[in-house]
Image: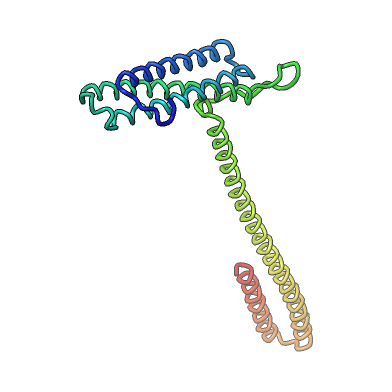
């Protein structure tokens, strides 16, 4: 419809019939593409481009027809007639939108087949199969899904890295505690050795004193003192081990 073209009621009907013919031609292009080239290819792309072009022209013409119904030039029509013609335009618009969705689905399916297809068994591994998560997605949706999966994997790797770092710190702390306990046990063993040496020296002196004094009572007292000293030392060592 040329720019500035003035319509009358009969001209509107003629232009609407041309829109219906344009919609029918577009539908034939889509059907030819789906029947003859279901797997895509150059010819399928050409038919899809031609169908999209016709749909664009159809959309412009329908908008002009709808605007004419709201203009003063359509005042000669009754309101019920205007509504009837608006309904015709809305119905044809619905068909146009349906054909647009059909082209989009067909193009997306062909692109997904190319994306998921691969060489046969003789030339390499089997191609990946499409899942329920990707069945209803177009190319942009597949890209978004892939990015979401990659982000989730990055988050899981970051969490795993934190866990490994925490485990490393715990292991280092345990190692330091083991070293400290080992040093404490070594110090305790040294103290026991020193105590045993002193006890042997004290026992030898007591025996020498008993031989020199010849006093039995004094020897008994000294012996009791030695036994008491030994008991005290042993108890001290045991308490030190528990502490």
Q: In the rendered view, tell whether residue 103 sits above or below residue 159.
A: above
Percent x, y of residue 66:
33, 28
Residue at image point 45% right, 17% down: 22
Q: In the rendered view, tell whether residue 204 sits above or below residue 119.
A: below
Q: Residue furthest bottom?
A: 213
Q: Is residue 22 left or right of residue 111?
A: left
Residue at image point 27% right, 32% down: 72
Residue at image point 23% right, 21% down: 81
Would you identify the image quadrant in which residue 16 lies? top left
Query: Which of the pair 66/41 is nearer the observer?
Result: 66
Percent x, y of residue 11:
34, 20
Query: Which of the pair 160/41 is nearer the observer?
Result: 41
Quadrant position of the N terminus in the picture: top left
Percent x, y of residue 211:
78, 84
Quadrant position of the C terminus in the picture: bottom right
Query: Looking at the image, what colour scheme do you see?
Result: rainbow
Would you identify the image quadrant in which residue 107 lies? top right
Query: Which of the pair 184/37 is nearer the observer?
Result: 37
Number of dots carrying numbers: 0
Q: In the rendered view, tell whether residue 187 sits above or below residue 165.
A: below
Would you identify the image quadrant in which residue 147 lies? top right
Percent x, y of residue 240:
63, 71
Q: Is residue 143 left or right of residue 192?
A: left
Residue at image point 43% right, 28% down: 60
């Amino acid at each position: 419809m040329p720019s500035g073209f003035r319509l009358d009621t009969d001209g509107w009907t003629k232009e609407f019939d041309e829109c219906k013919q344009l919609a029918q031609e577009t539908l034939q292009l889509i059907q030819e593409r789906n029947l003859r080239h279901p797997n895509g290819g150059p010819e399928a792309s050409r038919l899809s481009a031609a169908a999209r072009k016709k749909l664009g022209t159809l959309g412009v013409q329908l908008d002009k027809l709808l605007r004419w119904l709201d203009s003063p030039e359509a005042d000669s029509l009754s309101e019920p007639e205007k509504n009837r013609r608006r309904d015709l335009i809305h119905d044809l618009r619905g068909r146009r939108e349906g054909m647009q969705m059909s082209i989009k689905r067909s193009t997306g399916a062909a692109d997904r087949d190319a994306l998921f297809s691969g060489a046969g068994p003789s030339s390499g591994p089997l191609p990946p199969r499409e899942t329920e998560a990707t069945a209803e997605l177009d190319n942009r949706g597949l890209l978004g899904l892939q990015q979401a999966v990659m982000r989730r994997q990055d988050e899981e790797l970051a969490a795993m890295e934190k866990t490994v770092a925490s485990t490393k710190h715990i292991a280092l702390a345990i190692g330091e505690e083991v070293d400290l306990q080992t040093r404490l046990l070594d110090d305790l063993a040294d103290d026991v050795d020193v105590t045993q040496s002193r006890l042997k020296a004290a026992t030898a002196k007591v025996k020498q004193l008993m031989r020199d004094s010849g006093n039995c009572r004094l020897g008994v007292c000294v012996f009791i003192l030695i036994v008491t000293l030994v008991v005290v030392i042993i108890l001290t060592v045991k308490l030190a081990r528990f502490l």
